[in-house]
Image (cartoon, rainbow, N blue to C red):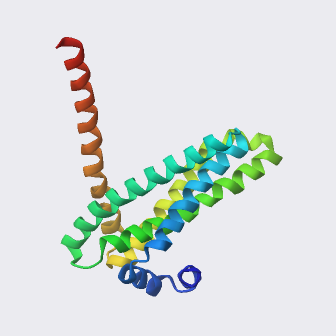
Amino acid sequence: MFSTLFNFVLKPSPTINQIMQERKLKLALLGYCVGAFSIVLARALTVGTSIFGFITSFLFILFFNVCISFFFSATAHLFLELTTGRGRAAGLFVLLGLSEFAKTLFVAFSLIALTFPTLQGYKGLFVLAVLLLQLFFVLYMMKHAYGLSKKMTLFALIISFVPSIICFLATIFILISAVFLLIFA
């Protein structure tokens, strides 16, 4: 597992294709756990939390990240397979899990912000920078996995969010309808 991470740093293109074929779900789960743990630890360092709150937050964020990545990898893969005819959804799920390692930078920022409290004002900017880094990482991996141009990869990524937005709006509509039925029925 760690040799795959090492090879990913040294030879990204062949390793991405290898990951897409082998579907190393343990590697994906490690990435999701590290990402969720980093978010919770960074928050705990700056705000503080109890053990129960830490574990609950970790499990919630882990579950949320895995669900979002599962849904995103399914929709992105469907569109990418229609256009390129190659790739695997499980491999894309693993690549998204690998992108979660970028969130370890949150812990580093929190530790530095504890030393230099003036950096707390730049927390939002740093979070945006890390999320953009993760997006760039995902685009880079998708580009190599599916053999698309940068513009087509970005277009595929944007198109992949359309089902998510539709599901979100449908859920809000259903909740509002349920509230109106409870009030007026």
The N terminus, quarter of image:
bottom right
Question: How far across and how far down the image is residue 174, in percent?
Answer: 23, 32
Residue in front for this viewpoint, 10 or 152: 10
87 vs 18, left or right, is: left
Relative to 104, is 165 above or below?
Answer: above
Where, quadrant-wise, is the C terminus in this rendering? top left
Question: Residue visible at 55% across and 85% down?
Answer: 7
All told, the count of numbered labels is 0
Identified at 27% across, 60% down, the residue is 75
99 vs 129: above or below: below
Q: Position of residue 48 (x, y in %)?
A: 71, 39
Q: Position of residue 46 (x, y in %)?
A: 71, 42
Question: Splitting the image into 4 quarters, where does residue 90 fall?
Answer: bottom left
Q: Nearer the viewer, residue 135 or 8?
A: 8
At 27% across and 57% down in the image, what residue appears?
159
**Residue closest to the eye, 121 or 73:** 73
Left or right: 48 with respect to 16?
A: right
Q: Is residue 130 left or right of residue 73?
A: right
Q: Where 55 sits versus 95, above or below?
A: above
Residue pushed farthest front?
52
Residue 107 image-quadrant placement: bottom right
Name the outermost residue toward the top. 184
Q: Nearer the viewer, residue 140 or 164?
A: 164
Residue 13 position within the rendered picture, expressed as x and y whole percent measured from the top left? 45, 83
Q: Is residue 41 left or right of residue 173?
A: right
Quadrant location of residue 141? bottom left
